Amino acid sequence: MNRLHRFDVLCAWFREHMHAQQFRIRTIDDYIFELSFFRRWLEQNSDIADIDDAQPSLLHEYAASLYSRELATGSINHKLAVLKSFFDALYEHNKLYLDFGRHISLPRLPRRLPKNILSEEEMSRVFVYLESTSAYLRVTTRPQAVKLRDHALVEFLYSTGVRKNELVSCMLQDVNFADGLVHIQGKGGKQRVVPVGATSLAVLRRYLHDARPLLAPKTIANVFVNMRGAPMGKMAVLDAVKRAVAGAGINRNITAHALRHCSATHMLNHGADIRYVQEFLGHASVSTTQVYTHVSIAKLKQTHARYHPREQDNFGQ
């Protein structure tokens, strides 16, 4: 039997596990690559026959080897985070009887401030432009339908703070108009429920009623569709955001992800608790998420209505 054969078997299991958890294909391939990097290190720097013979000290040596190579902190963090996810999953599913994951410490990453954040005044200009192009529009053609769709899309991105991947995968049944909530399929298969403001819902309702039937057949379940009636792709979302920003006379390279940063930054500026914003965005670590699990949906809705600037009368002033 080949050396580290069981390690290879466990890697194959982990790949299937990630597929079941609905990880993105690119993420799965990246994780498996990092595990193959660790496997090569084991072959070259240890004499263990297989992973069952490993001890926590071996993981400390691996981490030390990464630091000795003077890799970037982000690279070290990523390699160790993949390894931790791997061992956590193995331990949780009784594939290994030692909890190796708890022996892996991740380096603290430096905080990076988001670039190209629009001010509230600039966001107000964007919405003034969108309203001017669609508020009184009688939608009878597909180009007119796209204008109303773009308005609904930008409102939705800013109100919910979702990623563009989450937006393009949002289905009609995910939106709860009665409760003002949307069910989001997040990164790594993680799910969350996010409030949608009344302003965004009103534009979204009009888009679904007046514009979307001109664009897509009833068999398409995605909320946002392109002019050909297919689900919108990520580049189409980016183009819609760029059209809105350019139409408002703002000459800056603003992406769909920038609207996510804008949503969070503007709520914090208005006094929102950072714990709510992290729950709202769905990007907290597992340990951090545990702190926020007591935040109820009712509290999320209440805080969103109170602190999201688009829900306030003095927006942009």
Image (cartoon, rainbow, N blue to C red):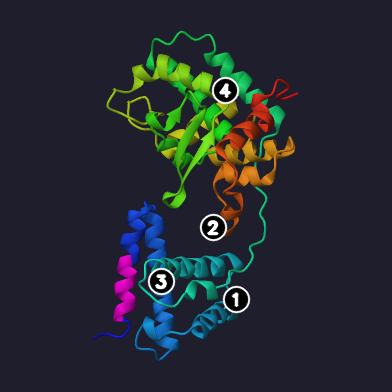
Q: Which mark is residue 198?
A: 4
Q: CA distance from mark 2 to mark 4?
A: 31 Å
Q: Report the number of discs.
A: 4
First in residue order: circle 3 vs circle 4: 3
Residue 49 located left or right of residue 67 = left
Assign the magenta stretch its main secondary structure.
Answer: helix
- Residue 202 in picture, x, y percent from top left: 52, 19
Residue 257 lies, with reference to residue 306, above or below; the image says below
Question: Which residues, given as a range, are shown in magenta?
Answer: 5-13
Mark 1 highlights which residue? Answer: 70
Report the front residue among 258 and 102.
102
Question: What's under tag 2, amino acid-wise?
Answer: Val
- Residue 118 in picture, x, y percent from top left: 67, 35
Question: What's under tag 1, amino acid-wise?
Answer: Glu
First in residue order: circle 3 vs circle 1: 3
Report whether residue 67 is seen. Answer: yes
Q: Magenta includes 104?
A: no
Please tell me whether mark 4 sits on a helix, a strand or a loop: helix
Which residue sits at x=55%, y=41%? 257
Residue 237 lies, with reference to residue 290, above or below; the image says above
Q: Which of label 3 and label 1 is nearer to you?
A: 3
Please tell me whether mark 3 sits on a helix, a strand or a loop: helix
First in residue order: circle 3 vs circle 2: 3
Mark 2 highlights which residue? Answer: 286
Report the front residue among 159 and 238.
159
Q: Which mark is residue 18?
A: none
Q: CA distance from mark 3 to mark 4?
A: 46 Å
Question: What's under tag 4, amino acid-wise?
Answer: Ala
Mark 3 highlights which residue? Answer: 35
CB-based contact (under 8 Å), mark 3 and mark 1: no
- How dense is the environment of label 3, judged by Cα within 10 Å: few (below 14), some, or many (20 and up)? many
Q: CA distance from mark 3 to mark 2?
A: 21 Å
